[in-house]
Amino acid sequence: LSSAKAWGRLADRYLVHDFMDEAALCYARAEDLDPESYVWPYRRGWSLIDDRPEEALGPFERALAKLERYAQAHEAYGEVLVRVGRGAEAVPHLERASELDPRSGHADTVLGLYLVSLGEFARARTHLERALAREDQRVETHVGLAQVYLALGEEERARRHSEISRNLPQSSRREDPFATP
């Protein structure tokens, strides 16, 4: 095959069936054939994010260079930076994502949870409460707020968020039309 779109379509099929290694290879080939497109490196990053987050950094960086104003690109890059232990580098990307998409709470949730891991509970609270105001059905936000309130000695608020989190789906859906076919 010599068409980026054909390689991309093949990668998309692999991706929807959870053949992530195969999808990553096909997206890499599509990107080689169409280096100006943001779609192929972005989807390649998503195909690598769970099993090989270190390898997802490069594709997300290349996509972000073309998608500077796309909140979800900053979210994805920030999230993978946190996963690989480079949280300090993630902060400006997560803040930018929050600024670009004031309806989404995902970036503030990821940033809040990162701050919880550092023990910065007051700063974490600010981000997690903003995330909750934007999306009140995100289980990760309620779990983070339960941890924050417990650490801050607000046990009743912690208990309430813990109870809410038990009644929500255990993972939150992310809306990102560029990430999947």
Image (spheres, helix red, strand yellow):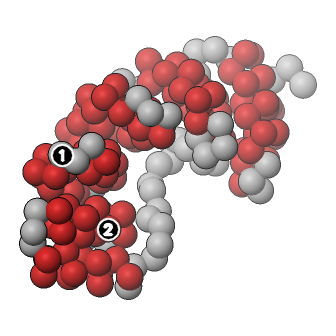
Q: Which mark is residue 141?
A: none
Q: Which mark is residue 143?
A: 2
Which class describes the residues within 10 Å of circle 1: few (<14), some (14-19), or many (20+)? some
Q: Residue furthest right?
A: 1
List x then y, in percent, for residue 74. Answer: 37, 33
Corner quadrant of residue 147: bottom left
Q: In the shown orientation, is residue 102 left or right of residue 83?
A: left
Q: Earlier in the sequence, mark 1 or mark 2?
A: 1
Corner quadrant of residue 42: top right
76, 100: nearer the viewer: 76
Q: In the shown orientation, is residue 129 left or right of residue 100?
A: left
Instruction: Say if 180 sits above or below 40 in the image.
Output: below
Q: In the shown orientation, is residue 130 left or right of residue 161?
A: left
What's the residue type where badge 1 is placed? Answer: Glu
53, 118: nearer the viewer: 118
List x then y, in percent, for residue 175. Answer: 44, 55
Instruction: Say if 48 sits above or below 59 in the image.
Output: below
Name the residue beneath numbered marker 1: 120
What's the residue type where badge 2 is placed? Answer: Val
Give the CA separation, mark 1 to mark 2: 16 Å
At 86% from the left and 20% from the top, the residue drawn is: 2
Disc 1 secondary structure class? loop
